[in-house]
Image (tube, coloured by chain):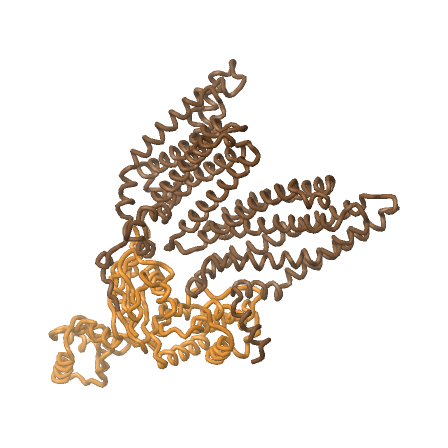
């Protein structure tokens, strides 16, 4: 099972909501879809869910084109939109039963599937509650349960953690971990990057409809140029250390920050090691010399400019 | 599993999911049960007060009829407001917030609309059934027979069904809340007229008697015609509702055009048969004019359709000899205009051919007059639609998108009808007695075709105008005709097939 987005374009008049983006991810991966508001995330996700058609390009789900065979493709996709279920006069169980019928799941199997999904998403205890009486976190679980009814190998989730309290977020994260372990491919957009970093093993970063970067998070971090951030703590005046550092080759900047010095280094691990040796040789008493690894948030902030079309 | 439970399970699986959902919501919500209880109480109170204050029923022979009319009025008032509003508000809300979720399932847009309609009709049947005992009771008060009660209840049910389908159509429109509220007010006025018309017709029918005419053609002839008209309207509104609720990427126009073409054919044959049997071509003339009015309206709709087909629709274009006929039925602005023009032409030609080939069909009526209206309305329809297209393409393209071209056409039509009339009226103020006195000013008014002395001028002007506006848009047509072909695999960038 592989999801391939190939030269995808979506134009609304003169606005290029999605502008020639391509990326791939496989089963068992949780991929974070990151970008500022208006970057084209929801549009891309809607195309993957077969709700919209691209202006050009295609998306293939297990080799099935969402343009050419949307009916087949949508059987493979579970879509969780950013809107929560709002049907009135409807219980959780009736809501799931309605969608199970809409997915043409019949007879005894329908009852078994719904019972199973309710148990998995921890909805059994509230199955007879009315939808409008549920909290946001519960509604999000109902939404996820609905998307899982037809057991799709691909899950597309648009801002599922938005507005959830910490407990609901942790529960959602755990559910996603289990689903990924079951071999589902999950594409999830969120503005809470720390949240994404904890559950995603891949990320796709877009801005103004254009792809900025895509790949495994570890690759994105390591390909963040040869620029590193190093934190140094020393016994003695920080000013002397900063002065010496600024005269050292490959050090781009050095700034004192709360008893520590933060420096930007352009170079490999070797270069960092040489800087440490040089500092010790100059008589600086180094207590701590720590490389800071960039996280998803750092990568996002460095890559994007927050511009919208 | 027993046979009974197996059968129940099969029926359960067979049911439209929308019907199950709607009926469950109706049962769980208090609105339906509250409205039903209220209706029953009102019916009971009305009948009770009527009987208590009615005096000597032994000497009155219209007590039952009057009581029935009271009860029918209450039933229709509730059903024409409550059922369509309940259905439309729910659908409009779901259309705006949740319909996408249905489109990622296997459910079809037609099943969504059908399910809504079926559930609403089930609620209507429930209300009618609950009221039926009160209605039937009026038989014992005299002045009304049982067949009349059932016929009038059946007719009232059809009116409510039409009202529900109309409300469903408005709810399906992809319009903003303000526009929908405005449309709902217009629909409400139509419902009020339907309410008055149903009661008037019911009272008239009871006066002349229904039961005694049930075995004759004088009842079944008009009844069949009315049933056919209601079926056609229901079908048209259903097809339009489905088209409106479909995703923008779908071939929305095709089912509507296919349905209208079929309806046009069937009603044309029926009109010809009626004209032949009655030895009067009025039915054929009315059919021709109504058809052309429908197709003239279609020019305004078609000119606002999409100008570029999406890949999903494009991949369904037949690559064989069927490509040409398919062009007329596929979504697309040029296709829509071509279809409406072709249908207008076919209407005019078929009326002419039928009346020319049969002496019986030449009798009565005025085919010549209807031919003028048919040609004139179609030509003015094309002229206004094509002019609106020119205005949008060359003057307003920065501000107005293709989907609002109908609005330009409508404004041009209003201006074309009003401004010359007012100018002519002001200039010839002292000599103005009737529209014909300023006939020369009304060359842009399609409704002036009734002025006999100017008809040839109007037809000439509308022909020239339609031709000129079409020629000026020929590049626009050409582009869409050239683009109307099945895309090759290479024309999609980056498509990789398994």
Relative to A256, residue B166 above or below: above
Give how far across and how far down residue B215 sits, in percent.
Answer: 68, 45
Residue at 70%, 43% in the rendered image: B213
Q: Position of residue A184 (x, y in %)?
A: 35, 76
Shown in brown, the chain is B
| Image-quadrant location for residue B351 | top left
Tell me where residue A250 appears, x and y as whole percent: 13, 73
> Which corner quadrant holds the C terminus of chain A?
bottom left
User: Which residue reaches farthest top?
Assistant: B430
Residue drawn where x is 67% and y is 49% of the image = B76
**Going 27% across and 68% down the picture, which residue do you hit?**
A4
Question: Looking at the image, which is closer to me, A229 or B431?
Answer: B431
Decide if residue B336 is on the left or right side of residue B360: left
Q: Can residue B90 be seen here? A: yes
Q: Is residue A133 visible?
A: no
In the rendered image, the vertical position of residue B131 relative to residue B303, given as above or below: below
Give the left or right position of residue A301, taking residue B385 as reference. left
Foreground residue, A261 or B390? B390
User: Where's residue B493, x and y in %?
Assistant: 23, 59
Q: Which chain is orange?
A: A
């Amino acid at each position: 099972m592989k999801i391939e987005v190939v030269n995808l374009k979506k134009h609304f008049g003169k606005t290029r909501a999605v502008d020639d983006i391509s990326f791939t991810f496989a089963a068992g991966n949780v991929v974070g879809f990151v970008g500022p508001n208006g970057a084209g995330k929801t549009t891309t996700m809607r195309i993957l869910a077969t709700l919209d058609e691209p202006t050009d390009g295609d998306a293939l789900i297990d080799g099935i084109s969402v343009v050419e065979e949307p009916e087949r493709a949508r059987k493979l996709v579970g879509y969780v939109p950013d809107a929560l279920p709002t049907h009135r006069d409807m219980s959780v169980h009736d809501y799931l039963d309605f969608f199970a019928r809409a997915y043409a799941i019949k007879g005894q199997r329908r009852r078994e599937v719904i019972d199973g999904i309710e148990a998995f998403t921890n909805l059994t205890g509230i199955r007879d509650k009315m939808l409008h009486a549920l909290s946001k976190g519960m509604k999000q679980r109902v939404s996820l349960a609905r998307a899982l009814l037809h057991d799709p190998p691909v899950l597309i989730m648009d801002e599922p953690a938005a507005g959830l309290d910490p407990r609901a977020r942790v529960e959602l994260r755990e559910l996603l971990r289990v689903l990924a372990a079951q071999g589902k491919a999950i594409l999830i957009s969120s503005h809470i990057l720390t949240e994404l970093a904890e559950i995603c093993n891949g990320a796709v970063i877009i801005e103004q409809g254009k792809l900025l970067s895509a790949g495994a998070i570890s690759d994105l971090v390591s390909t963040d140029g040869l620029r590193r951030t190093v934190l140094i703590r020393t016994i003695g005046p920080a000013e002397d250390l900063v002065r010496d550092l600024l005269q050292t080759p490959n050090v781009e900047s050095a700034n004192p920050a709360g008893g520590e010095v933060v420096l930007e280094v352009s170079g490999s691990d070797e270069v960092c090691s040489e800087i440490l040796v040089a500092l010790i040789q100059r008589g600086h008493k180094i207590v701590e010399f720590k490389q800071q690894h960039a996280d998803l948030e750092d990568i996002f902030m460095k890559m994007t400019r927050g511009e919208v079309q | 599993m027993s046979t009974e439970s197996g059968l129940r399970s099969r029926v359960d699986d067979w049911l439209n999911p929308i019907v199950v959902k709607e009926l469950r919501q109706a049962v769980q919500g208090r609105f339906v049960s509250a409205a039903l209880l209220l209706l029953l109480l009102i019916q009971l109170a009305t009948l009770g007060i009527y009987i208590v204050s009615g005096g000597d029923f032994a000497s009155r022979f219209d007590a039952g009829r009057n009581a029935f009319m009271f009860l029918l009025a209450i039933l229709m008032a509730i059903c024409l407001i409550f059922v369509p509003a309940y259905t439309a508000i729910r659908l409009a809300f779901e259309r705006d917030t949740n319909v996408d979720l249905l489109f990622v399932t296997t459910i079809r847009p037609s099943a969504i609309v059908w399910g809504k309609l079926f559930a609403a009709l089930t609620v209507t049947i429930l209300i009618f059934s609950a009221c039926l005992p009160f209605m039937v009771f009026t038989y014992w008060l005299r002045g009304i027979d049982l067949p009349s009660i059932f016929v009038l209840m059946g007719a009232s049910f059809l009116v409510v069904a039409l009202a529900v389908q109309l409300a469903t159509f408005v709810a399906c429109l992809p319009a903003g809340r303000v526009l929908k509220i405005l449309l709902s007010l217009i629909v409400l006025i139509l419902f009020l007229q339907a309410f008055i018309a149903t009661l008037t017709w019911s009272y008239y029918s009871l006066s002349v008697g229904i039961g005694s005419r049930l075995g004759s053609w004088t009842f079944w002839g008009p009844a069949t015609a009315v049933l056919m008209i209601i079926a056609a309207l229901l079908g048209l509104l259903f097809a339009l509702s489905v088209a409106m609720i479909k995703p923008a990427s779908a071939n929305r126009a095709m089912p509507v055009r296919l349905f209208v073409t079929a309806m046009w054919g069937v009603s044309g044959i029926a009109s010809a048969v009626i004209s032949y049997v009655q030895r009067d071509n009025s039915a054929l003339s009315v059919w021709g004019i109504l058809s052309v009015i429908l197709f003239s309206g279609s020019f305004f709709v078609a000119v606002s359709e999409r100008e570029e087909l999406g890949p999903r629709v494009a991949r369904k274009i037949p690559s064989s000899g069927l490509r040409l006929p398919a062009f007329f039925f596929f979504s697309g602005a040029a296709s829509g205009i071509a279809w409406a023009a072709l249908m207008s032409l076919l209407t005019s030609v078929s009326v002419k051919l039928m009346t020319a080939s049969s002496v019986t069909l030449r009798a009565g009526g005025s085919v010549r007059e209807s031919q003028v209206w048919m040609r004139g309305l179609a030509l003015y329809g094309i002229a206004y639609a094509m002019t609106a297209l020119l205005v949008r393409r060359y003057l307003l393209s920065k501000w107005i998108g293709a989907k609002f071209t109908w609005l330009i056409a409508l404004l041009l039509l209003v201006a074309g009808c009003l401004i010359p009339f007012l100018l002519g009226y002001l200039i010839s103020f002292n000599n103005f007695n009737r529209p014909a006195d300023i006939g020369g000013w009304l060359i842009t008014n399609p409704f002036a075709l009734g002025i006999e002395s100017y008809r040839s001028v109007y037809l000439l002007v509308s022909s020239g105008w339609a031709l000129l506006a079409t020629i000026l848009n020929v590049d626009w047509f050409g582009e869409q005709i050239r683009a109307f072909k099945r895309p090759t695999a290479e024309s999609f960038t980056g498509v990789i097939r398994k």
